[in-house]
Image: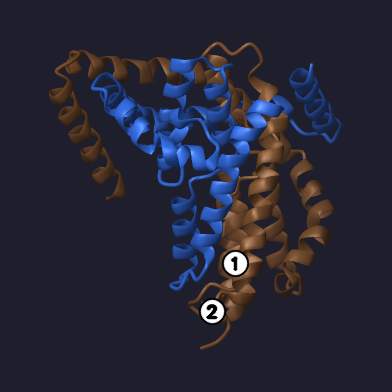
Amino acid sequence: MAMSWIWVCMLALSLFCGLLNGSADLGAAAMEGAGKAVTLCVSLTGSLCLWSGFGAVLERSGLQAGLARILSPVLGRLYPTARRNPKTMSVLCGNVTANLLGLGSAATPLGVEAVRRMQALSGSTAATDEMCKLVVMNTASIQLLPTTVAALRGSLGSAAPFDILPAVWVTSLFSVGAGLLAAAFFQRFGGLGDGRSK
Amino acid sequence: MLIPGLLLGVSALALGRRVDVYDALLEGGKRGLELVKTILPALVMLLTAVELLRASGALEALTRLLAPAAAWLGIPPETLPLVLVRPLSGSAALAVGADLMAAHGPDSLVGRTAAIMLGSTETTFYTISVYFAAAGVKRTRYAIPAALIADLTGFAAAALTARLL
């Protein structure tokens, strides 16, 4: 429903401003926008297919599973409760590595499974501290190869679509760091209740 | 060289492990095509709306109105519409980001900032609702504020790294 409201608001705002400014043929603009979307999609299709193919190779070759094993000890420190349950820890590591490698379609089911298992362990309908941390790590998107954005830049004629990589990495580190710090702060001083009580 | 090298390295490694690499590529490619199919209608609607906002002068007015907030975060005011839709809808963010990159050029400061923002943030509200709804979690506690703090930090950092890196 949220998108329906946003859609109606965007159209109403355009019409209102268009009447105020008395400018431009809005009908032509609408048709142009719709056409642009198709052009954009067509030029994106090539790189999207290529990188999805690359993602499938990462999955099937066991490279993703290998990376998950390497990251497991580090993540164990962040998730002490989940660590005590090997199956929970393995889906959790799978989720984080899938995100790192840009395997969006693999990351979501693993993340959902991890939260489900954490919920079963806590037995409460309130989010635990570790669930909040996992959600923050997922919403802050730590990605080694932001392929969709690179494809977008390439399709719009960028000279070097991947030259934003270092900036994306540093930015992601900042945002994940800030999110985890905020979570730690709320956990200690938030007064939003202990997830395990009740 | 980084990208072809990466493609070769991973493919060769997978082949060494007796994986049918080409078959995996094709299967993944099909998934990519599915993805395009699902985002195409959303992009049509949203780019139509964005184009209307731009042609009517609404986008410019909104940018001017929100300029003080942008200055506070240290981000280019042109990227504010992207900041507003990023946590709500992935395809809307893609549409607004593509519009910014097309209008200012993908290698301009605004275009690069928009790209870094898109690459380093996620559809926060969507992710939170999917994860918690599937697990039957009702009280999300501080998940939303903490995730939004991460997003805001990411937007500010994107403007900084677009200039420096």
Asked if marks 1 and 2 touch (Cβ < 8 Å), the reply is no
- Residue type, mark 1 in image: Met
In the picture, the disc for residue A131 is 1
Secondary structure type for disc 1: helix
Image hue for chain A:
brown
Q: Quadrant of residue B133?
A: bottom left
For the residue marked with disc 2, what is the amino acid? Gly
- Foreground residue, B99 or A51? B99
Distance from Cα at disc 1 to Cα at disc 2: 17 Å
Point out which mark residue A101 bears.
Answer: none
- Relative placement, left or right, of A53 versus B149 is right
Marks 1 and 2: which is nearer the front? 2
Q: Is residue A49 visible?
A: no
Colour chain B is painted in: blue
Horizontal and vertical percent for residue A74?
81, 59
Q: Where is residue B15 in the image (x, y as percent from the top left)?
A: 82, 29
Q: Nearer the viewer, residue A128 or B33?
A: A128
Q: Residues within 10 Å of mark 1 (few under 14, many from 20)?
A: many
Per the image, the residue denoted by label 2 is: A191
Give the residue drawn at x 55%, y 87%: A197
